[in-house]
């Protein structure tokens, strides 16, 4: 991000030149120009860094509660001052008026994501709420809701906790800082040739059903059981396990291509790729992810090759992750520098030329210092100079009363 501040320093030198040598601006205008230059540099630094490193990962948990929020209405009291008449005959009075707002009913599901993330609420349909409420045991409790300025309707929310222990998996997106995304060339990822059928990263837009089974894995593994496993290892080990199955004609280079396409995966990803042979009995396996214990990858590869790759392999994968997976300390990547691409520098330079050029043009043409020592005609008052007052004479003659 150094180029931003180098440009700001150059702009500051231009302002000093206009003040000291050209005498076309005054000292405080040079200072304002310098502050504006470094403010633009700071904003550009922040925006570029966030834009280049912002990323999202998937956290897994389970549904623990559903809530029904019924209809209610608030009524807020306001006061205002009203002026009547005009001129000497005007007077003011205080009036009171009310505004009313209706709050429509809605239904929520609360998901718990272990100690790594606070619980989160997701809006759901009434039908889905009723199904979950029944599966949770149907013990509905009325709880006084947050109803500021309540006027009409129902004051309570209706909560059903998961008392049966039924496992309803959930997932959610969480933002994090990914410096690897900003500098992938620092890692020896394979170059993905054009036309290679790598798969897009799963979006997981539905909090109750993920997209973590890709390719042929969808054909042989239960998505519900896979999500349940992720909820268990996610809440305890912070892992997000993705299974990617390639076709019978593929080889293990496809795993490396998939790793390169995803830049090694998100912070908590553990991606198991396999292919060749049949969907149930693959000929190769390749696991990647950010972990400080590489043994877990070799063991998962062995599990996939032993097969069969169906829902019966899920408990074995879960056991291995609980035993050996350890998420990498992401602070280890803080040493990576983040530098903006060339086009960002050019855009920033154009903005600086427009903003700073406009400011210094205004500073050179305004009339703020009438008695400038360099002959500029300004009328800003006492900024940078001594204000001259006209002399007032008094007659010595004593006034007669």
Image (spheres, helix red, strand yellow):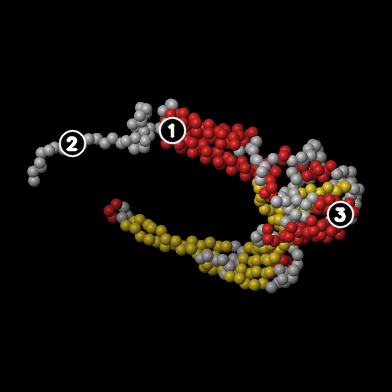
User: Around disc 2, counting alpha carbons within 10 Å, would you say few (fewer than 14), some (14 to 19), or many (20 or more)?
Assistant: few
Q: Quadrant of residue 52?
A: top right
Q: Is residue 278 above or below residue 338?
A: below
Of circles 2 and 1, the one toward us is 2
Instruction: Tell me if label 1 and label 3 are in contact, CB under 8 Å.
Output: no
Residue at screen point 66% across, 48% down: 177
**Foreground pick, 134 / 227:** 227
**Nearer to me, 146 or 88:** 146
Q: Indicate the secondary structure of the residue bearing disc 2.
A: loop
> To which quarter of the image does residue 89 belong?
bottom left
* SS under mark 3: helix
Q: Nearer the viewer, residue 306 or 106?
A: 306
What is the quadrant of the N terminus in the image?
top right
Residue under numbered circle 2: 393
Residue under label 3: 303
Q: Is tag 1's residue or tag 3's residue first in the polypeptide sequence?
A: 3
Compared across the picture, whether 167 is left or right of 93 comes to right
How far across and how far down the image is residue 201, in percent? Answer: 75, 47
Tell me what residue is drawn at x 59 percent, y 42 percent: 47
* Residue density around tag 3, few if under 14, some if 14–19, many if 20 or more, within 10 Å: some
Residue 203 seen anywhere in this rendered image of the structure: no
Among the two numbered marks 2 and 1 on one chain, the one whose residue lies closer to the N terminus: 1
Neighbours of disc 1 within 10 Å: few (<14), some (14-19), many (20+): some
Q: CA distance from mark 1 to mark 3?
A: 72 Å
The answer to whether 39 appears left or right of 52 in the picture is: left
Residue 77 position in % (x across, y down) = 46, 63
Residue that numbered label 1 is attached to: 363
Q: Which mark is residue 288?
A: none
């Amino acid at each position: 991000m150094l180029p931003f501040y180098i440009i700001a320093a150059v702009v500051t030198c231009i302002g000093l030149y206009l003040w000291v040598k050209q005498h076309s601006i005054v000292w405080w205008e040079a200072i304002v120009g310098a502050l504006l230059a470094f403010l633009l540099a700071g904003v550009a630094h922040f925006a570029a860094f966030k834009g280049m490193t912002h990323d999202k990962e998937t956290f897994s948990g389970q549904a623990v509660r559903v809530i029904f929020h019924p209809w209610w209405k608030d009524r807020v009291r306001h006061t205002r001052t009203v002026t009547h008449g005009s001129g000497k005959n005007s007077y003011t009075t205080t009036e009171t008026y009310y505004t009313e707002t209706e709050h429509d009913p809605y239904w929520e599901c609360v998901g718990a994501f272990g100690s790594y993330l606070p619980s989160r609420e997701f809006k759901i349909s009434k039908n889905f709420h009723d199904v979950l409420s029944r599966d949770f045991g149907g013990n509905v409790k009325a709880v006084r809701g947050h109803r500021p300025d309540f006027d009409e309707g129902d004051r309570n929310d209706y909560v059903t906790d998961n008392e049966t222990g039924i496992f309803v998996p959930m997932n959610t997106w969480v933002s994090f800082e990914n410096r690897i995304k900003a500098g992938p060339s620092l890692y020896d990822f394979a170059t993905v040739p054009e036309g290679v059928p790598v798969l897009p990263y799963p979006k997981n837009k539905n909090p109750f059903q993920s997209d973590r089974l890709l390719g042929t894995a969808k054909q042989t593994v239960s998505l519900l059981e896979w999500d349940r496993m992720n909820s268990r290892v996610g809440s305890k080990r912070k892992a997000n396990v993705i299974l990617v199955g390639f076709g019978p004609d593929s080889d293990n280079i496809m795993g490396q291509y998939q790793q390169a396409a995803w830049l090694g995966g998100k912070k908590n990803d553990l991606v198991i790729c396999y292919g060749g042979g049949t969907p149930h009995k693959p000929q190769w396996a390749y696991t990647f992810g950010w972990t400080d214990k590489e043994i877990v990858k070799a063991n998962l590869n062995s599990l996939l090759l032993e097969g069969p790759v169906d829902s019966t392999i899920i408990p074995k994968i879960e056991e291995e992750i609980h035993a050996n997976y350890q998420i990498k300390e992401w602070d280890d990547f803080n040493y990576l520098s983040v530098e903006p691409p060339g086009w960002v520098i050019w855009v920033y330079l154009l903005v600086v030329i427009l903003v700073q050029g406009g400011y210094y043009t205004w500073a050179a043409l305004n009339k703020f210092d009438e008695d400038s020592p360099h002959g500029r005609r300004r009328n800003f008052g006492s900024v940078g100079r001594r204000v001259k007052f006209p002399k007032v004479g008094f007659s010595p003659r004593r006034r007669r009363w």
